[in-house]
Image: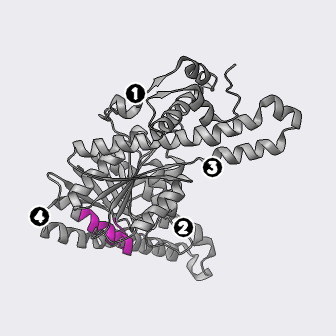
Amino acid sequence: MYTKIINALDGSFLSDLSMEAGLIIASRTDNAHLIGCHVYASRLHRTRFEEMEPGLPEQYQEEENLTYLRDTHEDLISEGLQLISDAYLAPFVEKANALDLSYSGLTPEGHHYVKLLEALREAAADLLILGAAGLGVIEEEPLGSLTERLLLYGEMCDILVIRQAWQFKNRPIVVGVDGSPNSYQALKRAVEMGQLMGAEVEAVAVYDPFFHSTVFQTIASSLTEETAEKFNFTAQEQLHDEIIDRGLETLYRDGLRRAMMMAEEMGCTIKTEAIAGKVYAQLHHYAALRNAGLVVVGRHGLHYEKESVIGSNTHKFARLTPFNLLVVRPAEDDLNIPELHKNEETTGLIWDAEAERILQRVPMFVRKMAKRSIEARAVEKGLGRVTVELVMQVSGKMGMDKK
């Protein structure tokens, strides 16, 4: 699963929990090498001391005394911080030895997140483990600045952010699946982690049908009566409410079926759930309801743009969640995502020619969702074909008349 793991350590409570997680994962993984890393910043302290020199009492302003202070401070900072770094790594070394793990220690000097990013690249690490916050944690800050920067710029590996003890007794692994390739890579990692830890896996798909309603309400308050009639606003609003929203759910449930098939190919049976609402908020609520031992999400989702360093839902969730979180980078190679069988994907229904003609009136960008929604209604009614009457019944007064 992961063979080169960097554990960022600073002696804080969450750092100690992250160390325990790293040791457990490495001990259960073949050929894993674990690197304990603490970055210290002696140059930062040296610069600060130089900036404070003009404010020292008069007796210390003489060059001889000032030189002595500089030398003493230099020894204390350089040697002292190195000793502190070694002290942070000592428990890691002791426990790694006890578990007979392959490990090494790393104590670079410099700016914390910069040096950690360099270490990740140089080691070609595939996993970074660290606490959600470090020694400077405060109640008002849900995510430490170092951790947040690594989440933003650590695209070269998966990142495990620790907030709780690493244990899975009666606690599932929850993974978000939105149908994007990165979400299926997240599913793969979730299943692998579940197999490693003996934990059940639950895949959740969150779709947001309420956004369109909000947009249409805003548009409605802006349009004149004449413009609304010309735009056929009432028909378009119904199209979203009755077709697109239902089609969204169908698309996301299809994604979950693919997730189930993918998990089964890996020898795992998973539970699935489709939920309507704001993505990061509903994933948060579901994880809380299930008391998740770990939540797994892709770094990016369906609306990925190359300029984006991390998906907005992933970023917001990382700030919000009180649970351990694994953020998964996209797969380097194409994933083998299962295809739905034809009868699962299209139901195999026959469309009357006139019903098909009416469907063509639906805008191209939502036509696929509209078709799935209509076919789903036909299946519910036990029909073997899609008729004009069914299309009109589902579509209501949406401007898709028979003329």
Rate crowding at label 2 as few (under 14), some (14 to 19) or many (20 or more) other CA atoms within 10 Å.
Answer: few
Q: Which residue is mark 3?
A: 210
Q: Is residue 373 above or below residue 4?
A: above
User: Residues under labels 3 and 2: Cα distance?
Assistant: 52 Å
Badge 4 or badge 1: first in the primary sequence: 4
Q: Are circles 4 and 1 on residues that touch, CB within 8 Å?
A: no
Badge 4 or badge 3: first in the primary sequence: 4
Q: Secondary structure at mark 2?
A: helix
Q: Are circles 1 and 2 on residues that touch, CB within 8 Å?
A: no
Q: Which residue is mark 2?
A: 48
Badge 1 or badge 2: first in the primary sequence: 2
Badge 3 or badge 1: first in the primary sequence: 3
Q: Residue furthest left?
A: 100
Q: Residue at x 35, y 56 (%)?
A: 202
Q: Which residues are magenta?
A: 9-23
Q: Is residue 203 visible?
A: yes
Q: Is residue 19 magenta?
A: yes
Q: Amino acid at mark 1?
A: Gly
Q: Are circles 4 and 2 on residues that touch, CB within 8 Å?
A: no
Q: Which residue is mark 1?
A: 348
State the image coordinates of residue 153 (x, y, percent, origin top left): 46, 48
User: Residues under labels 1 and 2: Cα distance?
Assistant: 72 Å
